Amino acid sequence: MTTSTRRTGAPAHVADAPSFESFYRGERDGLHRALTFAVGDHRLAGEVVDEAMVRAYERWSRIGRYDDPAGWVYRVAMNRARSLWRRSRWVRPGDPPDRERPVAELPDPELWAAVAALPRGQRDAVVLRFVLDWSYDRIGEALGVATSTARSRVARALPMLREDLEATS
């Protein structure tokens, strides 16, 4: 099984990696959107994505050569969000969004509730597949699971989402 730390072919030179600036400009907003959807809190998502981006910047000579640096940032941001949930009173996925917190980038409330009710692994896979339009290979890399597991998580989640959304219609 490969992880997000897998490198392509022969060792790459730092010059072969994209610049951090172009990576940041190209990936930050999408990662923020995906994390907002996954954690249900726009502010928390921004905080953890920014922290993960700082970590990526500090290690860019290595991270920039990964097959999927955005997957690494996503994983680091989710780990940070989970750590904050354990230590504080942040809203956890599955809880309804707090109306005091900005959640403007979340979809309609019924869809949010259906996605939030999914088990964590399925929720993460669905968010990466449909919010960021990532391939199953890329989802597997980001979540540290096999491609077939990523595909299976999405496949199991879709009937659950369909059933939940039909029940609320």
Image (tube, rainbow, N blue to C red):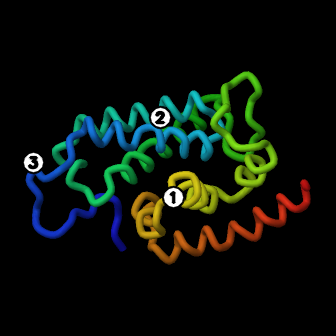
Q: Are marks 1 and 3 in contact (CB under 8 Å)?
A: no
Determine whether the residue tagged by mark 3 lies in a helix, strand or loop: helix
Label drawn at residue 48: 2
Distance, label 1 to label 2, CA atoms, is 21 Å
Front residue of 80/124: it is: 124
Q: Residue 120: which quarter of the image?
A: bottom right
> Residue 127 at x, y = what percent?
58, 54
Q: Callout 3: few (<14), some (14-19), or many (20+) C-alpha neighbours within 10 Å?
A: few
First reached walking from the N terminus: tag 1 or tag 2: 2
Residue named by callout 3: 15
> Residue 92 at x, y = what percent?
67, 40
Distance, label 2 to label 3, CA atoms, is 28 Å
Q: Residue 50: which quarter of the image?
A: top left
Q: Are marks 2 and 3 in contact (CB under 8 Å)?
A: no
Q: Is residue 76 left or right of residue 85?
A: left
At 50% across and 45% down in the image, what residue appears? 78
Residue flagged by tag 1: what amino acid is it? Asp
First reached walking from the N terminus: tag 1 or tag 3: 3
At 39% across and 53% down in the image, what residue appears? 71
Residue 100's place in the image compared with 125, above or below, is above
- The residue at the far bottom in this view is 148
Q: Callout 2: few (<14), some (14-19), or many (20+) C-alpha neighbours within 10 Å?
A: many
Residue flagged by tag 3: what amino acid is it? Ala
Residue flagged by tag 2: what amino acid is it? Val
Front residue of 17/63: it is: 17
At 57% across and 32% down in the image, what residue appears? 87
Q: Is residue 166 left or right of residue 152?
A: right
Residue named by callout 1: 133
> Residue 100 at x, y = what percent?
73, 22
